[in-house]
Amino acid sequence: MKPLHPLRGLVAATHTPFRTDGSLNLDVIERQAAHLLNDGVKTVFINGTTAECTSLSCQERQALARRWCEVARGTELKVSIHVGSNCLPDSRAMAAQAEELDAISISAFAPSYFKPRDLDMLIGWCAEIAAAAPETPFYFYDIPVFTHVSLSMPDFLERAPSRLPTLVGLKFSNPDLMAFQLCLAAGGGRFNLAFGCDEWLLSTLVLGGTGGVGSTYNFAAPIYHRMIKAYEAGNLAEARAEQLRSAQLVRLLARYGFMGAAKATMGLLGVDVGAPRPPHSSLTADQIRQLKGELETLGFFDWIR
């Protein structure tokens, strides 16, 4: 297996850029990458939930993977590729491509229409995907709020390695912090856990976590950089204040429909990733103006300077 580049610090779960007609706008990826590097974010997690992966074809996801890896080549940016889907052959094809592109890792969430009944079925599913990229580190992406597959992740980490030799950890998008703590201890602490709920990241640092994969890191990374720095310096009051800003920001965006508002926020920062695909809602021009005003009132544009 290739050397592991753990998902630590801030890993941006990137948006998929669309044109006004809904087609991919691959030209924007270079601007996304430059924006992230300017904000000190050096790893991206592409084709995941924030990328609207379930609204993309396998071919579109492969085109995004190719372009991100082209843009990242020769820079500090590293690319981790999510390859999960409800179609096993598609997942295997995307995993094989990710290995060819030299992605640092792949991940996959559970199928969510016909669901695995138990851990054995889930582990078998993941093993089939990982086998298509036998040299690439594999993360299971636990996000039960969307997949409605809620199985024990501590047990998964104890049982999966014998059938899943490239397993290196979890993308843990799950609010169960007891399970998170048990996962950190699983296998003698050998697994890398990347937390996926930005507004609670500080809680996982206290438990021993080392970072997260999140959507708000696309446009609010300075908040989290300060939070982590304050926590590591023992300044809990400052760390809590920064985490509160994150929670306030997420609450504001959620009122408009998080995906549409998050992509609109990217546009306000000069990175036009377009509107989301249905069934996500898009913001009207009036709503974007209103959102900008509320972000200004909140202090967001000062927070990210």
Image (cartoon, rainbow, N blue to C red):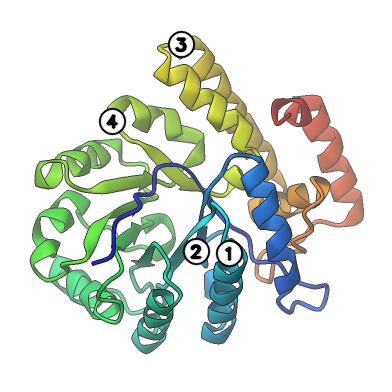
Quadrant of the rendered image containing residue 146 = bottom left
Q: Residues within 10 Å of mark 1 (few under 14, many from 20)?
A: many
Q: CA distance from mark 4 to mark 2?
A: 25 Å
User: Which of the pair 229/77 is nearer the observer?
Assistant: 77
Is residue 270 depicted above or below 164 in this figure?
above
Where residue 123 sits, quadrant-wise, is bottom left
| Label located before the other in sequence (3 or 4) | 4
Q: Which residue is mark 2?
A: 48
Q: Which amino acid type is marked by label 4?
A: Gly
Answer whether residue 154 is visible to the viewer in this image: yes
For badge 2, the amino acid type reads Gly
Disc assigned to residue 235: 3
Q: Give whichever of discs 4 and 1 has the lower sequence position.
A: 1
Residue 3 at what x, y percent from top left? 29, 58
Q: What amino acid type is highlighted by mark number 1?
A: Ala
Local secondary structure at mark 1: loop
Residue 300, horizontal then vertical, whole percent: 73, 30
| Mark whose residue sits in front, 3 or 1 | 3
Look at mark 4 in the image and give the residue it sits on: 208
Q: Residue furthest front?
A: 74
Task: Check disc 1 and report the residue beneath it.
Answer: 51
Say if 4 sits above or below 189 in the image: below
* Mark 2 nearby-residue class (10 Å; few <14, some 14–19, many ≥20): many
Residue plotted at (53% across, 80% down): 62
Q: CA distance from mark 2 to mark 1?
A: 5 Å
